[in-house]
Image (tube, helix red, strand yellow):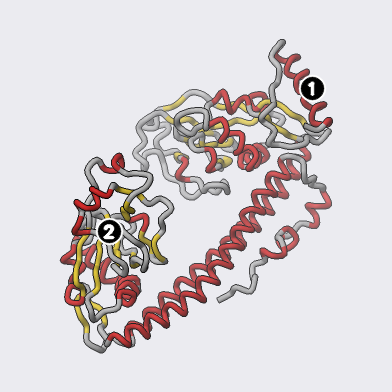
Amino acid sequence: MSQHLAVQNQRMRGREQTRSGSAELRIEGSTWYGNIPSDWNVDRFKRIATIRNGQVDPEDDRYKDLPLFAPNHIESGTGRLLEVESADAQGAESGKYLVEPGEVVYSKIRPELRKVIVAPFKGLCSADMYPVRPGYRIESRFLYYEMLSDGFSQYTVLESDRVAMPKINRKSLGECIFLYPDRKQQLRICEFLDASCAAIDAAVAAKRRQLETLDALRKSIIHSYFADHCGEINERVKDVAAKITSGVTPDGGSAGYLDSGVPLLRSQNVHFDGLRLDDVAYIPEETHAGMRGSQLKPRDVLLNITGASIGRCTFVPDGFGEGNVNQHVCVIRSGPHVDHRFLAAFLSSPMGQDQIFSTFTGASRQGLSHSDLGLIRLPFPKLSVQREIVAKIEHHDLKQRRLFGCIETQITTLTAYRKSLIHECVTGQRRITDADLRKMNAAAILPVDASLDGGTNP
């Protein structure tokens, strides 16, 4: 620890002793803020803000029409309010906290998600959140930015890891070390961060629109490949497949899963761009043997047939080895006259997806049955033509993945820059002057390698 920081520690201890008589201000292990500027103040969170107590009945006529803020209404890491609904519209019943405009609302559950807002109007917040009223020394927006910062998040995550459920309690939050300059500097910092974050968010939004454009372009191109062959012979899936089946959930459900064994593919593992095995479940060899009907082979086509991911489709790659599926994933084994890649590509295409969802919606069920799937029709050119179509799709996808990767890297760079900018400003590592505010514009604050263009426009 630097000599400067040690001096600050001693200053803080003296301040704490003056205010509380004997308790020392312990900051060892809470050094997320780094070196403290000499003209900044350091204090406990509980001394600069008040975590409100007292809940109200959301069914009371005085409160039921007020907006109710909940963690799921806030975007992780940005502090953006995604939606607003009244307590009545959300069917709220249990006690909620009353929130006044300008108060900071902070989610105590899973603090690594950094869900925090400044309340734009009077409302309620769920019991999973803390309504925080800044003291006279602190601007609401400055409190918001510091609670949004990575460093503050590191402290709260460390504290939340000490309990069974990841959440920060009132006492731990109150004991957190909080840095702040005078109010004039706070206002400058907030003005700078408001404009900077808005510009970065606009750049990220532009990048996401590029990804949406690329996705729409891919769908259009794939549609054209299949549409060119719609006038040819059409066949039903059940007529070109050697097998259509799905698995079951093993006895005991998730409690029976192992850390190793035979992979059990579930709907979260099946995606349009292939299998994602980060959270794959494993089952014992004997369980796999008992699920003989749904044992996987290379080139089996996999289709999600239930839930929010219905319609997602891919195939088992060569060399995958043993595997099985549960009841939410359908296995389609291609017959000798259809290429598995052609079948998977068609089911993933707009033409295939339209049939999947029209069948699913018309049946008003929670899933797609094997018989419904078997009735889906697909173009059926000769095998050599199928492979030509697949080659064109794979060539296009290769180019598109490169573009996707480039744009996603830029989004990652922008997001990281936003986080570091907030951290630097709320810890005094970056000093904001009136001159900075006069010069500030969106182009000046963006990193050169994160410009909107980046050479990735489709």
Residue drawn at point x = 51 percent, y = 37 percent:
107
Q: Quadrant of residue 343?
A: bottom left
The image position of residue 34, as x and y in percent, is 74, 37
How far apart in space, not on screen, are marks 2 and 1 (Cα)? 62 Å
Does residue 350 appear in the picture of this structure? no
Which residue appears farthest toward the top when viewing the image? 21
Residue drawn at point x = 81 percent, y = 33 percent:
2
Q: Quadrant of residue 386?
A: bottom left
Residue drawn at point x = 57 percent, y = 27 percent:
51
Would residue 304 be found to the left or right of residue 143 on screen? Answer: left
In front here: 149 or 86?
Answer: 149
The image position of residue 244, as x and y in percent, is 20, 66
Residue drawn at point x = 57 percent, y = 47 percent:
77
Crowding around mark 2 (Cα neighbors within 10 Å: few <14, some 14 to 19, many 20+) is many
Residue denoted by label 1: 10
In front here: 367 or 302?
Answer: 302
The disc placed on residue 383 is: none
Which corner quadrant holds the C terminus? bottom right
How many numbered callouts? Answer: 2
Which corner quadrant holds the N terminus? top right
Residue denoted by label 2: 329
The image position of residue 192, as x and y in percent, is 72, 50
| Foreground: disc 2 or disc 1 | 2
Which residue type does callout 2 highlight? Val
Would residue 54 be found to the left or right of residue 185 on screen? Answer: left
